[in-house]
Amino acid sequence: MILAQQGYRQPDPLDKAATTRPEHAIQRDEPHEETPDVGQEGAGRERETGMKRHVARFMPASPQALASNRVLSRFEPWLSHPELWRMRRRTVAAGAAIGVFFAFIIPVGQIPFAALVAMVLRVNIPVACLATFVNTPLTFGPVYYAAYVVGGLLLGDRPKTYAFSEGLVEDIGWFMQFIAWVHDLGPALVVGTILFSVFGALIAYASVAMGWRISVAARWRRRKAARA
């Protein structure tokens, strides 16, 4: 009676059997390393994270950053589509190709044009915008003159010598001088510019795709060596 009042409970034979089980038969909730997904798609995603971090450092932070552009602000609802910001080998390589193409094909407005085409094709918009900086006002003169020389050789025209005006980039009228220069050089410049744009885009796509593969393979080898 006294034991019942003090909360004493008759031992259960099953409980006793459980406490006397061998130590190796008791299952312990110990932490264990999760087995990685060895599927092709899962392994590819896991291995590409290193390359993604490298590329993402140079990208705009958000769609709102691109929407601050006067032209792109009209397309702000479409700029938030996840496919336009996804870091995949194909979308990044295609974005780089688009950016390089517009960097050479036109001297102004490269970023809006590259962003619009990337938006239509559903490739990485930030990379497309970033790739346009391979050709800047500081390099317009030499690049387009080289394109003119190449175009002239293809068309059989003898290249003309052109004297660049001193302070072309710093002068506020540099763009009008550039337009006059383009008009004077004519078809040879057009052909050379198209050639530079197309081949530049192809080289950009191949370089990014190859660099991505090399980075992924090197990272995978390091992880494999660390597990061995």
Image: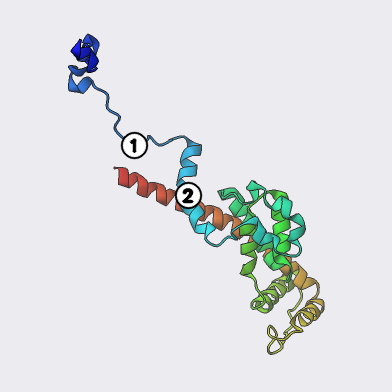
Residue 129 in view here: yes
Q: Which mark is residue 49?
A: 2
The mark total stands at 2
Quadrant of the rendering where the N terminus is positioned = top left
Q: Which mark is residue 33?
A: 1
Amino acid carrying label 1: it is Glu
Q: Is residue 27 above or below residue 71?
A: above
Quadrant of the rendering where the C terminus is positioned = top left
Q: Residue 99, how many percent across, how many down?
A: 66, 61
Residue at position x 75%, y 65% from top? 70
Mark 1 or 2, closer to the camera:
1
Q: How has the structure been colored for display? A: rainbow
Left or right relative to 63: residue 218 = left
Element carrying mark 1 = loop
Tell me whether circle 1 and circle 2 mark residues in contact (CB < 8 Å): no
Element carrying mark 2 = helix
Left or right relative to 137: residue 49 = left
Residue at position x 72%, y 68% from top? 193
